[in-house]
Image (cartoon, rainbow, N blue to C red):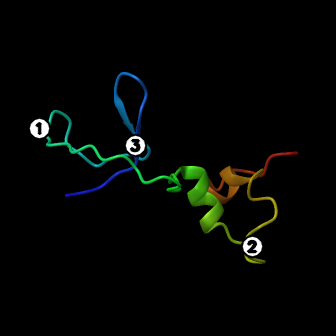
């Protein structure tokens, strides 16, 4: 059994994260409201909580990510 954070958009329940489920798979879903004050997990929250400041990270990584990922020539910025 897994637990996920989700919200109801008025028509469907929308998970906050990608789920590794088989399309068309039958499920039993139990609905339980999140406790008041519970922090919603989101990609932005994850980035904030897991960000690092390290001298090993190149200062131009954002502008030159293709160069560092794929070896393409550096872009002029």
Taking 28 as reference, is 46 left or right? right
Which residue is at 69% across, 71% downward?
52
State the separation of the CA atoms marked 2 and 1.
44 Å
Of the pair 47 and 69, the residue shown nearer to us = 47
Q: Which x, y percent locates residue 34?
A: 40, 50
Q: How many marks?
A: 3
The answer to the question of whether label 2 and label 1 lie on touching residues, with beta carbons closer than 8 A, is no
Give the residue displayed 51% in from the left and 52% down from the top: 40
In the image, residue 35 above or below residue 28: below
Callout 3 secondary element: strand
Q: CA distance from mark 3 to mark 1?
A: 18 Å
Residue 26 percent across, percent down from the top left: 11, 38
Specify which label sits upstream in the sequence, 3 or 2. Answer: 3
What residue sits right under mark 2 in the picture? Answer: 53
Q: Which circle, 3 or 2, is nearer the viewer?
A: 3
Instruction: Mark 1: give few (<14), some (14-19) or many (20+) Cα within 10 Å.
Output: few
List the residue tagged with mark 3: 6
Q: Nearer the viewer, residue 59 or 29?
A: 29
On screen, residue 8 versus residue 27, left or right, reads right
Q: Secondary structure at mark 1?
A: loop
Q: Which residue is mark 1?
A: 26
Tag in front: 2 or 1:
1
Q: Is residue 30 above or below residue 24?
A: below
């Amino acid at each position: 059994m897994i637990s996920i954070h989700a919200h109801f958009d008025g028509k469907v329940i929308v998970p906050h994260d990608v789920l590794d489920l088989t399309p068309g798979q039958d499920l039993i879903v139990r609905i339980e409201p999140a406790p008041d004050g519970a922090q919603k997990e989101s990609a932005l929250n994850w980035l904030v909580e897991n960000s690092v400041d390290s001298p090993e990270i190149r200062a131009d990584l954002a502008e030159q990510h293709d160069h560092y990922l794929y070896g393409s020539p550096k872009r002029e910025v």
